[in-house]
Structure formats: structure tokens, C-alpha cells
Amino acid sequence: MKKALLFFLFLFSGISFAQNIKLDGFILDNSGKPLEMANVMAVHSVTKEMDSYAITNDKGRFQLTLKVHSTYTVRVSYLGMQTKEITVSTKSENLSQNITLEAGNQELQGVEIVREMPVSIKGDTIVYNADSFKSGTERKLEDVLKKLPGVEVNADGQVEVEGKKVQKLMVEGKDFFDGDTKLGVKNIPADAIDKVQVLRNYNEIGALKGLENNEESVAMNIKLKEGKKNFWFGDLNAGIGVGHDESRYIINPKLFYYSPEYSINLIGNFNNIGELPFTPQDYFKFTGGFKNLMRKGGTSFNIGSNDLGLTLLRNNRAKEIETQFGATNFSYNPTKAWSLSGFAIVSSTTTELETKTRMERRNFPLLEQSDAVTVQNTQDATHQKSNLGLFKLSSSYKPSTALQIDYDGLLKKSKQDEFTDLFSQSNLDNQYIHTTKKQDPVSFNQNFNLYYTKNEKHVFAIEAQHLYQEEDPFYEANLGLNPFPESGLFPVVQSRYDLNQDRLVKTNKIDAKFDYYYMLTPKSNLNITLGDTWSRQDFDSNLFQRLEDQTTAQGNDSQNHVDYSFNDVFLGLHFKWIMGKFTFNPGLSLHQYRTDNTQFPVGKTKDDFFRVLPDVYAIYQIKKSESLTYNYAMTTEFTDVSKLAEGYVLGSYNSLFRGNRLLENALVQTHSLRYFKYNMFNFTNIFGFVNYSRRMDAVKTRASFDDINQFSTPYNAYFADGMLTGVANYGRSFGKYKASVNVALNWSKFNNIRVPFGGIEIPETTESFTQGYTAKFSTNYKHWPNLEIGYNLTVNDYQQATFYTQRPSAKLDYYFLEAFSLVSEYEFYHYNNSDDSIQNEYDFLSASLIYQKKGSPWEYKISATNLLNTTSLNDDSFTQFATRTSQYVVQPRYLIFSLKYNL
């Protein structure tokens, strides 16, 4: 049945092409010189529909696909030239015709422009006319973006253009929840969108454009339709339905207001149907637009997270999810020179998870006096509550083009609780385990920037960031056996052991740097950087056993009190010059590092040294839209306080960790090569990159095992780790069709030490090789059903085991009878390991039918999720010692009736 359904979907995609002919030629100026990036479109004289469009290549060539026995008006435009129209009548043979444009900017007089170019290029900006790609079923920005040539949107709402991640999303030039694109693509109404502008080589600091390397930086700006400006717009949506055992609901209001002086966005989402507008993963990766000031400084000192590793959702699915979400974003211009903006995001999510997991770890039987493989099977039920809040305020003052002063403040606060009941079966024992995780972390990040251009030769930049962060994770495990009897940490023998771990980690970190740019020539500049990174971390922890009479007991080395400070003062020098098609930007930086690690009662450890770090950035600009980029960097990598604290820390019910105050820094070398080509002549998008990193003296793990229980401590590895990543993508849009093929490969090698029974250290090298292959094809008809089909194969080779996931998919959307929109999505999964001892098949089908008469603000919708009532999904993961495969329960079938009013 499933194979038949997939065959039908693939067969349906092969809609036959109508009989067409080609019209090609060259666009020239009056001197006979070819015009690159000229816009050419053909409008049918009877239907007034634009049947084909093209943009000329570097030789001025264009090609249009036209219907036979038809008459067209072919319109040609080019910046700085007079627009020209010609009439073309087609027969059954291909046609060829050159067109010459005259100098000047005059539009044709008395000509009614009935269509706009779907795609046009103005310098570094690609402009998509949204209406040219809409079929009528689109409801949000995401639906429009997926139909644009060269644009991809993943399941998490992250947008990529030409293979580059969009770093900033704006509406009418104003930031839309700066730091993430998900809220925009999932909420901005499709009917409000006029144009989508892709800003390549983007730098929001005008003074630094051309001085810094912005070739990988992409932003997106949404232009609204005229009727949406200076008016409130959006929609109010509410729905009710039935599920497996209780009623379901969704309330989703969205309101927007944009004017030149200010803007306001309001988004709400309250539901128990599993729709997640904002996840804990989104919270932790949400940058708020803060960038890494020291990205080319040569030092990596990232404040590690001390969170408890709360269970994350797979594919944003779980047994039960209930969400309350609210967000607002604003901008205001008190004067022409001063602008204010900010946002507030609050979210509360209650989640129920049910998971079965199998863990396998290879052993050394003769040395560890154990089986060849340790196997643990667990069944767990988890209740999770997450309250998340983000608040940002930004100010930008630009009294002139020579001066810009910016300030940003970002507050992140959360409260997370997780309770798990778990049954564990392993080689040696079976037991029931209860765990509790609680954490209320808070962080406040501030950013101050000043940019001053003295004249065309001298540019100055001062940038500073301050981070204050406080983390207080609490962990409790109640289990039937003492997992670490030899440690002496839990000295009182009881029928059940109640283990508790308190931690408090406070971080103060300041990054500051001064940049001076001197323009030697119009094509070369010198950049001198003076910078400093200072950090202080206080780490306190207490590991204890709670007794049956509610008193406590603890063993030796069960507490930590650590004061750790880090300082990096550096001087950098970079020289950038352009020579023909080549751009070179080599540099080096001189660093003085100083660390001070005080642990009570152990004592103090200091380190002080100098290091010179080189880096190279080079571009070969083959054509305007074709380039090859090479990047090399040598980086000194430092660990944070969590790996230095030498008292015991309980990571989980079967994991005990002890830091190493004598850890040294690691040295990382990275090479990356990226190729990019975007051919507007035939709308072909090709990109690929290869990254290789080699990490020497890396901080690795020395681990010993007793059945499922692990004791570990960090050390500096004797051998280098390596990682090689490669991605290749080919995409093309032709007429009403869009297709792409993507390959992603990742190989990694890790070195660790195993300590079997008897204390003999055995170096262990593990390798993993993951592969992803994806193919997609979609149609974009105005008056016919549209189909998107795809196939994805994921291969995770973890050395000890290999897992395969095949995922064919199909999506149907159809706008018909000028009022109905039908959208249906289907995904089929086949999951297995290399010997088929683990395998599963499952699929998901969702569908919705919307009725909205033209011109009416009311919309009626019936939708169903998980129509096939699939009960569980599979996934797998790899640590450097073990592999895990899991099966987790997902929400059942829901049927929802909703009503929406469009403002």
C-alpha cells in the first residue's frame, strides 16, 4: 500500500510539459556591448499572464520558453538604459533575436505595465516579486520562501540563500526579532508580502563595508504591500478539536504595524496539539543579534554550559506537548539619527516523553573481566516543564555617515524542571531509577560599539561586550544500588540511594577591541587590532547523599570551590588587497595569555605564555556570481572552569566526573574551501564546501567503566583529533519547476583513554562517518495542483554500529474554485541497522482544507495531524564510547476545526 502510494505521488509529479518553443538572443547596448543582468520577460498578449522570464548572463544572452502559435510582448529593462518592448509571434520552430537598448532611464510612455519581473538583481541585492511565485495556498512567509529560486528553509525555520545562512531578517528595513529567522518565517502573513530582498555581502555597519570580509554574510528584507503600511494587519486564529483522549485547542493571534516612524509586532500561540513556536533549543541558540567580537582574534574561549542536559525533543515531537507563547517586537525612531528597537519573548511548555533506549558499549573482556559488549535497555517516562524568557533593548545613533554608536542589552531567564521514572536492564542488574533535574539560569549580555570615519583613508571602530551569567543546576537520582561504591562518596548503606548534586556557576566575561583601518589605495587597506578578553568564573558544587531520616552524608572530595580567571591581550595585523579577480587578506596576531586557577583547599595554579597565530582569507572571484573562497586559521582553544574543578560532580545517575586543574590549552588548525555559483541565466545554484580541522592537545576523556557506570576525568590528548566535513548542492529552477540535489558528509576521529580493571590505560581511537543524501523536486503552477516530492537517506556509521534512515516524502497543495486551499504532507520512514536486528517503519500524513472567499476576511479550516496514527519514531546517537538507538512515543491523531479573521 505504501509503495503504491509513493509510486502514485512520483507518477503525479511527472505532469507533461506543454508543447513549447525557445526564444533566445542577446541584449546589447547601442555600441554592441553585451549587457549582463538585463531583465527580460514575455507577457502573453491574450491572457496577460507572464509565461516566461530571464536574466542575461555575462555574454548578454537570454532564453525564454514560450507557447507555440501565440503572440507575446517581450519587455527588456536594464538599469541606466531605456526600457524596450517588442512583439513576437511564435510558430512551431525556435526563434532567435537580438535586442539593442538605448542609453537613458525613461520608461515607455503610455504603456501599461501588467507584470513585474519575478527576479531582478540590483548590485548585491536579489529582489523576488512574491506574487510571481504564489499559487494561493501560501499562508506564511515560509511557504513563499520555499518557492523562490536559490532559497531553502529547513524544518527549524532557518533560511539559507545560495547555501549561506541568513543571519538577519528585517521587515521594511527594521529588525524582526534580531538573532533568528524562525519567528519571522513561521508568522509573517504571506498575503502581506510584496518583495523579498536578499542582501548579499551584508554589513549593517556602513563604515566597515568593504573593509571586512562580508562575502559569507546574508540578510533578508521583506517589503510589504502598500495596503499593509500604516495600518494594523495580521490575523486572529482559534481552533478546537478532538484527540485520542481529550479535547484539543489552538489560539494563535498575530498583529503587525509598520510605519516609517515605528513598528510593532505581536505574536501569541496557545495550543496542546504539539505546535511548538519556540523550543528550548531555540532559546539556547538565540543570539539576539550578538556577534562574536573575537571571531578573527585567534582565541577560542567559550563559556561552557553547565545545564543538566534536559531531554530534548526529536523532530519537535513528543507524547504530549502543551505550549503558551507570547512575543512582541518593536522599533521606534525618536529622530532621524536615533533609533530604538527591542523584543520580548516568553514561553511556557509542558512536555510528556516516553522513550525506549538501547545503549551498547564495546569492552575489553580480558582486562575488564566483563562481557565483550555492555548492553543497557531502558524505558523511561519524563515530565518536563520549561519557562523561558528573552528581553532585548537596542539603540543606534547615526548623526552622520561618519559616526555610529550602538548599544544592545539582552536578558535571558529560564526555569526548567524535569522528573523521570526509569527502568534499567543491563548485563549485571535491573533497577528502577527516579531522577529530578532543576535549573534557573540567567544571563545578561551587553554590547557597545562606536564607529567613526575620519575621512576616506581612516576608519576607527571600538567594540565591547560584557556577559554576566549565573547557573544553578540541581540533580537528584534515587536508585536501588550504589553506582560508585569504591569512591566512598555515598558512605551509608541503604535500601535505596538518594544522590544529590548542587552547583552554582557565576561568570563575568568582557571582550573589548579597538580596530584601525587605513586605506592604502582604493583596493587595499591595513587593519590594526588591539584587543583583550577577560573572564572570571566561580564554581561551587556539593555532592551528598540524603538519608532516610532526611539528614545528609558525604565522602571526601565531594565539594568544589574554584575561582578561575582568564586573560588574553593581543595585537593583530591584517593586510587586505584586491588584485584583479583575487582578494587576499592574510594576518597574524600576537597574544599574551594568563590563567589563574585557585581551588580550595588544593591551592593555586597559574600559566602565562605568548603565542603568534596566523590566519589567511582569500577569494577568487571567477565571475560576478561565481567564486572560490579559502580560509585558514590557527586558534588557541581554552576550556572553562567546569573541566578544571577537581572535586567530584555527578553528571547523571551512572556518570561521575572529576576535573583536572592541570589541563592545558589546545591548538586547532582549520582549513575551509568553498565554491559558489549562481547562474541567473538558467537559475542554477551550485555550492559546495570542504572543512578540515585538526585539534592538537585537545581536552579529551579518560574513562573507566563498571557495567553501565562511568567515571571520567579530562586530560590533554597525546594524539590529534581530526574532522572533515563536505557539502555539495546543485539546484535549478526551470519554468514552473524547481529541483535540487544535496550531499553532506562528515568524518571525525577522536582519541580517548579507557582504563579497564587493573588500572591499565588503553588508548582508544573512535571514528564516525555520517552521510546525508537529499533530492527534491517541486512544481509551482498557478491553476493546477502543485506537488513537492523528496527523498532523503541518512547513514550514521558509528564504528560499533551503522544505522540507516530512508525518508521519501511528498506534499500536495492545490488552490481551486477561487476559494479552497488543500494542503497535504506525507513522510515515510524506514529505519534499520546494518544487520537488521533493529528495524522499524512508520509514516506521517497530515492534511488541511481551507475555505476563504476572495475579498472575505473570514477563513474556515479543517486540519488533521498524524492521520495514520503513528505511535513512535526512532533515532540514534553516538558518544565517543557508546552508541544509542531510541524509540520514542509521539502524539496521536488530532482533528482540528479552526476559524481565522484576517485584519
Image: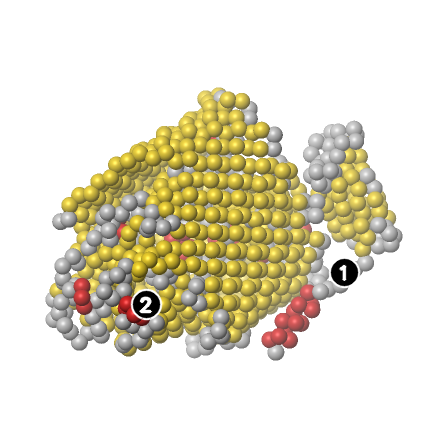
Q: Describe the element under mark 1 as helix, strand or loop.
A: loop
Identity of the residue drawn at 63% across and 49% down: 685
Q: Nearer the viewer, residue 797 or 411?
A: 797
Q: Nearer the viewer, residue 452 or 853?
A: 452
Q: Which residue is mark 2?
A: 364
**Badge 2 or badge 1: first in the primary sequence:** 1
Task: Estimate the x, y position of residue 344 in percent, counting from the top left.
Answer: 39, 49
Q: In this orientation, which residue lies closer to the viewer: 749 or 866?
A: 749
| Residue 131 percent coordinates (x, y) | 65, 51
Q: Quadrant of the N terminus?
A: bottom right
The correct choice, above or below, for 587 with respect to 327 in the image is: above
Q: Callout 1, which amino acid?
A: Phe
| Neighbour tally class for label 2: few under 14, some 14-19, many 20 plus, Cα within 10 Å | some
Residue 241 placement (x, y as % from top left): 49, 72
Q: Residue 68's spot in the image, x, y percent? A: 84, 54
Q: Name the disc covering residue 676, or none.
A: none
Residue at point 49%, 52% (across, down) = 725
Nearer the observer: mark 2 or 1; the answer is: 2
State the residue position of label 1: 17
| Horizontal arrangement in the rendering, residue 111 relative to residue 125 (left or right) | right
User: Could one spot residue 193 in this view of the protein?
Assistant: no
Q: Is residue 484 left or right of residue 214?
A: left
Q: Secondary structure at mark 2?
A: loop
Q: Is residue 258 above or below residue 497?
A: above
Q: CA distance from mark 2 to mark 1?
A: 63 Å
- Counting every numbered tag in the picture gives 2
Q: Please tell me whether residue 829 is drawn above or below residue 39 in the rendered image.
A: below
Query: Which residue is found at the position 44% from the left and 59% from the top?
Result: 768
Question: Residue visible at 58% across and 33% down?
Answer: 582
Q: Amino acid at mark 2?
A: Phe
Query: Label 1: how many residues lie within 10 Å, few (<14), some (14-19) or many (20+)?
Result: few
Front-most of residues 349 and 159: 159
